[in-house]
Amino acid sequence: MATGSDAHRQEDPANTTSVSNLQTEIKGLTETAQQLLTDKLLLESEISQVKKRASRLEEEIRNLRTPPMVIGHIQDLVDEGAIVRSSNGTVFLVSINPRIDESLLIPGARVALNQDNLSVIEVLSDSWDPLVVTSEIIEKPSVTFDDVGGLEEQIVQIREAVELSFTNREDFKRLAIDPPKGVLLTGPPGTGKTMLAKAVANSTNAVFLGLVASELAQKYIGEGGRLVREIFDLARKRAPAIVFIDELDAIGSKRLDSATSGDREVQRTLMQLLSELDGFTPLEDVKIIAATNRPELLDNALLRPGRFDRIVEIPLPDEDSRLSILKVHTKKTPISGRIKLEEIASRTDGFSGAELKSLVVEAGVSAISKGNKKITKSDFLGSLEKLTTNRMKDKNDNSSGLYD
């Protein structure tokens, strides 16, 4: 028979089950609490990100609701502030933001004005017309002087007038002479005027600004002159620089007494160009290259020394020049050994450099269409016959006379 102490030592199965259940519940509650704590931290992080985004959006909304500033220019500085001209032409005496660097506050500076009291809030950088900005050629052309055939004498003249001014400044000072300001390239279409300008841009470290003169012919009074002034201002700022103006006769034609309003605006643009070429503001390290195939139309004021100091004529190539041009265009082209370039050069009398390049291209197209690996003599002769026929058609076509 069991004693009382033995009965106490025996465990109650119900109590054991209850303790086990409590431990299981405590473990489950602990895991749930840990999960809830993790979720709380994640939610707090998301709330923080949402608040930052809301703050940014509120800042953007405030900026969008901020009234725009008026653009103006400083005319003069006085003790009380600055005299500014707003965009509508009205002149005001206004206060200046004390945080602005005083060295930036100069007459002519472009500034932002408060819309309410027109006080000077900020000094802005100079603005350039999109046409002026896009005229700057960032990447150098791939054309070099080695790619220009038959123009050795013209290459020497243009390099003396342009490159020598950049590389031998001290020699010009020692001789007390001013370097040439500009070079005018004249000659029939397709003789290599623009290609020469590209080669100059490739051979120098100067900034190259290129545009067509017809882009300067604007509709409204003074716009063309403003563009010319901005182009030369940009060139002076980027100096050393080269300004290339193609088809100069578009704005450089002779001035006539009987002219329409459009002609008078073109003449105003021309007068601004004349002033920039030889005016009170020196060009210094800015050189001008212009090209035209109608030099007889140009105003005499453009042609005098001091504006275009050198007039380089580029004629149609002679036989030796044509051979040189053909060698340039076939330098990397696989051609048959039966082809004698001398014979091709002798049969292309009157061809321009552009037509000779077209001759090689047409011969290449013919070879590709036949599946040949090289250009054969028959390809060249067929291309020559095709171009010659087209030239004869152009000469016999009188329809162009309708547009003279």
Image (cartoon, rainbow, N blue to C red):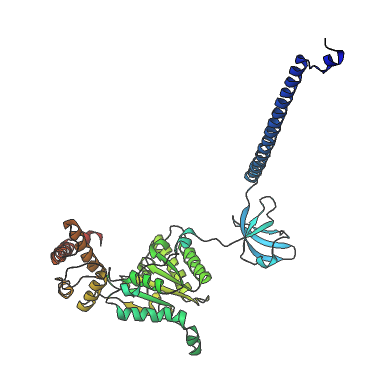
Count the numbered circles shown.
Answer: 0
Toward the viewer: 382 or 313?
A: 382
As drawn, is 244 to the left or to the right of 1? left
**Residue 347 sits above or below residue 81 on the image:** below
The residue at the point 20 percent across, 65 percent down is 359
Image height check: is 278 above or below 172? above
- Which of the 4 quarters of the picture holds residue 328? bottom left
Which residue is at the far front? 1
Residue 153: image location, x then y, percent = 31, 81
Q: Is 152 rendered above or below residue 382?
A: below
Left of 268 or right of it: where is 403? left
- Image quadrant occupied by the N terminus: top right
Where's the C terminus, which quadrant? bottom left
- Residue 390: percent from the left, percent from the top? 17, 62
The picture quadrant where one finds residue 143 is bottom left
Q: Name the side, left or right, on which 278 lies relative to 395.
A: right
The residue shown at (29%, 75%) is 314
Q: Which residue lies furthest to the top in this view?
A: 1
Residue at the limit of the structure toward the bottom, as seen here = 175
Identify the residue at image location x=75%, y=17%.
18
Image quadrant assignment for residue 6: top right
Horizontal side of 142 relative to 365 (left or right) equals: right
Which of 401 and 185 lies nearest the eye of the viewer?
185
Closer to the camera in the image, 212 or 164: 164
Q: Can residue 153 be seen in this view?
A: yes
Q: Kindly identify the residue that appears in the image at 64 percent across and 67 percent down.
A: 107
Q: Position of residue 99 (x, y in %)?
A: 72, 60
* Residue 300 visible to the viewer: no
Residue 288 rendering spot, x and y as whole percentages: 42, 73
